[in-house]
Each structure stands twice: as structure tokens, then as C-alpha cells.
Image (spheres, rainbow, N blue to C red):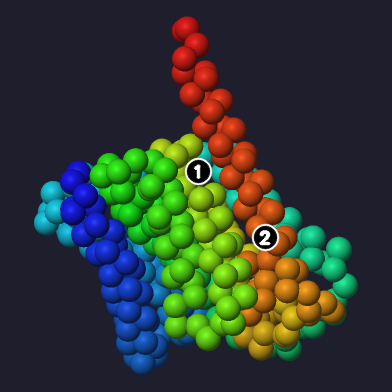
Amino acid sequence: MNRKKAVVCSVTAILVLVISQLVAGLLSNVFGAVGVPKVICNALAGIIYFTVTLIIVAVFYGKIMHLDVKELGIKKFSIKNKWILIGLILPIAVEIFYILMISGKYLPSGMSNKKIAETLSLGIVYTGLGAGFVEEIVFRGIIFRSLEKAWNTKIAVIVPSVLFGIVHILGKSFSVGSALLVILAGTAVGIMFSMITIESGSIWCNGLVHAFWNMIIIGDGLSIGEKADKLSVANYVLDTNKFALTGGEFGIESSVVALVGYIIVTVIAVYMIKREKHLSTLPA
């Protein structure tokens, strides 16, 4: 793939994410307007988000750009059990650390059962599965593979990862410190997802790891931070306001605790990659 084509693929990939998100939100609102329960609309939004993304990718990159979508990491769906385990351990370990090691107060929201179901359906299906897999299709699928083909693997790892960090501060009125922390953490988690992509050979494993993280950390089941989140089912409000622990204005996703988690998983992925390369060189 030439570099001009790689840039076009990368730029349009961001547009794919935005368009799919808008379509999902629009159709979800339409379903709600005709009387479909919100808990179902929230789940449909996540399914539509993912489905529309796959359709656009197949049509635009497959038919118009004449690319094999398998070469973009979008292969037959397959998940390695080890990444299911690691994907669950990472966010759960972060939450357990805060609850056991950092003093705070547990505050239930007092939501009705109906509201809890609506919140969890949005957090699990849309924020979790939908956003988790779509973002990986875009960043570690289309953008990563395009840059890798046009330049090299190092460029393909670094550029989308930094971009991934920057995307998370767009439209936000963060302080300089919070913005830098978000970019650092976003870049680190982007590198982590890239290593999982390289190890697994497709976007599905890192998509699931991403989905688990979103469900547990930002899915509004249990919110951990300096202040209570009225949209969450429950809150653990930290007694500390230390920037490194709270993650600043973005939250614990950009904290030092989460950053350590990203680094540990990245090291595990790199070890797996090197081990598999070593085993492949051994005589049968």
C-alpha cells in the first residue's frame, strides 16, 4: 500500500467511527420515539454501532478502496481464552486496588430497577461491546494495518496510539495537566492494544479487552472518582484528590494505577510475541 492511500484510509477510518456513532444514536432515538423501551434501545444502539461499522468497512474499504478487509485485521471472529482472562483481570484489579488501598465512601445511587437496567444495557452493549470493538476496528484495524503496510510496525504502533490519546481530549475543557495525562494514558493503552493485535493476529482479542475495560470502568455500574456520578448505579468516592491517583479531570482511566495496568499487560503481550517467534524457529 502506498503512503497516500494509507493516509486516506486512516483519515476516513475516523469518519467511519463518527458516522456509525451518529447512525446508531439516530436509529436508537427513532426506536424510542415509537415506544420501544429504553433498555432495548440502548442495547440496539450498541448493535447498530458495530453492524454499521462493519457494513461501511466492507463497502468502502472492500469495494471502493479494493482492500482485503482480512488484511485490516478484520478476520473470522476468534478469541483466545488467555485474552478473555487478562481482559477481565485488568479492570477488576484496578477497581479492587482503589477499593482496598484508597480510602473512600461507597454511595449507592438509589436508582429504580428500571433505571439500573437502562444504565447497564447502555454500559454493557453500547459503551462496552459497541464502542470497544468499533474503536479497535478503526484504530488497531484500519489505521494500524494501513500504516504498517505503508511504513513499518513501529510507526503503526506509535501513531494510532498517540492519536487515540488525543481523540479523548477533543471537545473537552481539560486543564493542561489533565490533557497531558490523558494523552499519556491514551498512548499507553493504545500501545497495549497494538501489542495484543500483533500477538493475536486480528482485532477481536483487543476488541474484547477494550470492551471489558469499558463495561467495568466506564460502563456506569460502579464509578470510582473524586466525585459521585449521578448517572452511575453506584459510586466509590475517593477521599484523596491526588492528581496521580484520581487521573485528574478525565478520571481513573488516566491515573497512575491504570497506567501501571496498561504497562503490565503490554509487557505480557510482548513476552507472548517473543515467545511465539522463538517457538516458531525451533525444529518440528
The residue carrying pointer 1 sits among few (fewer than 14), some (14 to 19) or many (20 or more) residues within 10 Å by Cα, namely: many
For image coordinates 49% across by 24% down, the residue present is 277
Identify the residue at image location x=28%, y=74%. Answer: 19
Residue at the image point whose x is 68% and y is 66% from the top: 255
Q: In the rendered image, which residue does mark 1 sit on? A: 195
**Relative to 176, is 197 above or below?**
above
SS for callout 2: helix
On the picture, is 227 further left or further right than 204? right
Horizontal relation, residue 205 to residue 235: left or right: left
**Labels 2 and 1: the sequence-earlier one:** 1
Residue 189 placement: quadrant: bottom right
Q: Which residue is mark 2?
A: 258
Camera-side residue of 148 and 42: 148
Q: CA distance from mark 2 to mark 1?
A: 17 Å
Q: Is residue 24 left or right of residue 4?
A: right
Label 1: which secondary element: helix
Q: Is residue 111 above or below residue 143?
A: below
Q: Amino acid at mark 1?
A: Met
- Please, is residue 209 above or below residue 171 in the view? above
**Looking at numbered disc 2 in the image, what kind of residue is underneath it?**
Ala
Count the marks: how many?
A: 2
Work out whether residue 58 or residue 111 is closer to the camera in this orientation and state it.
Answer: 58
* Number of the label disc, if any, that sits on residue 175: none
> In the image as oriented, which residue stretches furthest toward the top?
283
Residue 160 is situated, as x and y percent measured from the top left of the image, at 40, 56
Quarter holding the N terminus? top left
